[in-house]
Structures are given as C-alpha cells and as structure tokens.
Amino acid sequence: MSRADKYKSAGVDLDAAALAKQRIGTAVSSTQTPLTLGAYGAFGGMVRVPEGVDDPALVMSTDGAGTKVLVAIMAGIHDTVGEDLLNHSVNDILVHGAKPIAFLDYIAGSNMDVETIAGLVEGIARGCRAHDMALVGGETAQMPGVYHPGHYDLAGTIVGVVSESAALHGDEVVPGDRLIGYASTGLHTNGYTLARQIVFEDMGLGIDDEVPGVGATAGEALLAIHRSYFGVIHPVIDKIHALAHITGGGIEGNLGRPLPQGCGARVDRSAWEVPPLFRIMQEAGEVDEEEMFRVFNMGVGMIAVVPQKCTDEVRSYAGNAGVETWVIGEIVEGAGVELV
C-alpha cells in the first residue's frame, strides 16, 4: 500500500474530497450577491452589510436538520435536507424581522461519497438563491470512528440584518391581537425520531411504500421540504407584532417565546384541519393528542400575531402567494399558551 492510500484505507479519501470540492465551488459561486466579498476557498466568508438599513443589527442563528437526514440516507436523496436546513434557518431569523444575507454550512460524517456531499451543498445553494443570499463558506469533515459509514450530520449558521428600530421583540403584542397560522408542508424538520419509529417500525413501511391515505410514499411524505415563509411574511412585516416558528416543542413550546409579560395565547385547534399524515401517524403509533401537538407542528409551520385590523391584509398577501392561512386564536390577558 502506498503512502497516498493509507489515509484512504483509514476512512478519508482525499481524491473524492477534491471532486466534491469542485462541485461545491460551483454551487457556492451560484449564490454570490452584490454583498459578497472575497473568493471561494478562503478561510472565512465575508459579506457587506446592505445599504439603506438604518441602525443595522445582525441577527444570527445556528441549527441542524436533525434525524431527518436518516430518511434522506434511506432514500438516497440529499439535496432536499440541504434546502430544509436553509429554509428552517431563514424562518428562525424571520421571526425577528430579519432579511437573510449569508449562510455557512457544516457537514460531518463517515465515508460520504461525492454525490452525497455535493447534493447537500447544492440543496443549500438552491435555497440561498431563492432568498438572494450568499453561501459564504462551510466545513465538510470526514470523521470515521465518530459516525457510522455513510452517515452524516448537517448543520448551519445564518446571518441576517434588520433595522434595530424595526426588529420584532414581541413588546407590541396586546390582548385582542389575532393569531394567524400559516400552513406547513408536512413535518418540516422536527419530530423525526418519533415519525421514523411510527412509519418504519410500527407501520412496517419501506422508504418507497405508499403511506395509506396520504397519496405519497414514505420517502416523499417525510422528505417534503420545510417551507420558507420569508416571501409571504417579510413584505408585510410592519403589520405584524410577533412571529413564532413552530419547530421542536410544537405550538405550545414556541408561541409563548415572543409574548410579553401579562399576555397569553388561546389557540383553537378546530380552526384548521390537521393534514392526514399526522392523524395517520397518531393512530398507527397510538400517540396521545397532547403529545402529537408537543412533538409536531400539526400543519401549522408559522404563527403571526397581528392587530385585528391587519388580519385580512396579512392573510390576503399569503393567499395571493399560494400559502393557506387560518385565524387560529387570539392573545388574551394572562400567561402561557392554551390549546382548546
């Protein structure tokens, strides 16, 4: 065995890494914006703060795609979880009113081939282009001994900007404000440990088997891309008092986060029809209703808190863009989130 092959035999293929880097370079270059500084391949990524933002404040968030990546590995489809991660991150800073300007990814795994690595980054880049933001860098780490062969973890950091005076903190929320729920596109990127157990163990389905009553295979249903709400919310952000991205912890675990002292929320669970996938999983897994609402988004991916007089305008903007919404409750005096 030559010296050049020893690292490969230990689990890291530098030749494959070089091929992946070429594909990654093409994907990264496709996301450059007028704010981008520097060339691809540097040790750090740079972007300008956009002009025209008074008292700019940077908004940053780090998150991962969770165990949804295990479904992607089963299906052999990796670009969609890349886009999931990007959209999830966009939503996380959108709740503060921020516009995304840059993203960095982190991919760590073992024996990942070129198609896997490139697919992940190409999905992230596709999401970046859709939001006119730059993929300014990242890290790809082959870590045999830490991860099982062929497995990986996916995470990223997003940078956005908002005028300090326009940032959403929830301080303008008052009793009487309405809650607008925005339709999700499935599970998004939360609850997959339980979802995988139900679909693949309790229901005994394979990745290409159709989920009864859903009209999609297990892979299609579980890999549905996490919706970005930026395009339907940011243009009307000045009509909104607060936002809650419904991720891990469900409605109860997220809606309370932006509410000021003295304000609670009452959510009417009959205000929208829970998509079939959630009900099928609930029945097949024998999961309690309360637990379903704590683990999953149950069809509501984002909630906007808006003054009653702005409700129709905010909903109309989303409807014209093809995103279904419902008035699902209101802000009340008190504390906490009550689902009725």
Image: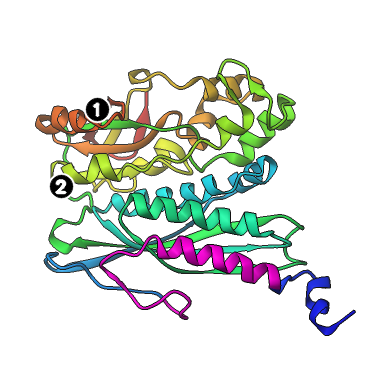
Please provide percent x and percent y for residue 21: 57, 68
Q: Secondary structure at mark 1?
A: helix
Q: Earlier in the sequence, mark 2 or mark 1?
A: 2
Q: Is residue 107 above or below residue 238?
A: below
| Relative vertical location of residue 4 with respect to residue 68 in this rendering, above or below | below
Q: Give the percent coordinates (x, y) of residue 87.
A: 41, 48
Residue type at mark 1 is Gly
Report the residue marked by disc 1: 319
Q: Residue at x 29, y 51 (%)?
A: 94
Q: What segment is highlighted magenta in the picture?
A: 15-44
Task: Please say if 261 is above or below 322.
Answer: below
What residue lies at 61% left-to-right and 48% top-to-bottom? 69
Q: Quadrant of the N terminus?
A: bottom right
Q: Is 135 situated left or right of 263 in this image? A: right
Question: Is 29 a magenta residue?
Answer: yes
Three-letter code, disc 2: Glu
Q: Is residue 314 left or right of residue 221?
A: left
Residue under the point 63% across and 36% down = 194
Local packing at callout 1 (Cα closer than 10 Å; few below 14, some 14-19, many 20+) is some
Report the disc number at residue 236: none
Q: Is residue 222 left or right of residue 228?
A: right
Q: Please indicate, yes or no, whether residue 311 appears anywhere in the rendered image.
A: yes
Regarding residue 142, the answer to whether it shows in the image is: no
Q: Which residue is mark 2?
A: 172
x and y percentages locating residue 158 in the rendered image: 39, 61
- Residue that extends furthest to the bottom in the rendered view of this protein: 3
Residue 196 placed where, x, y %?
66, 36
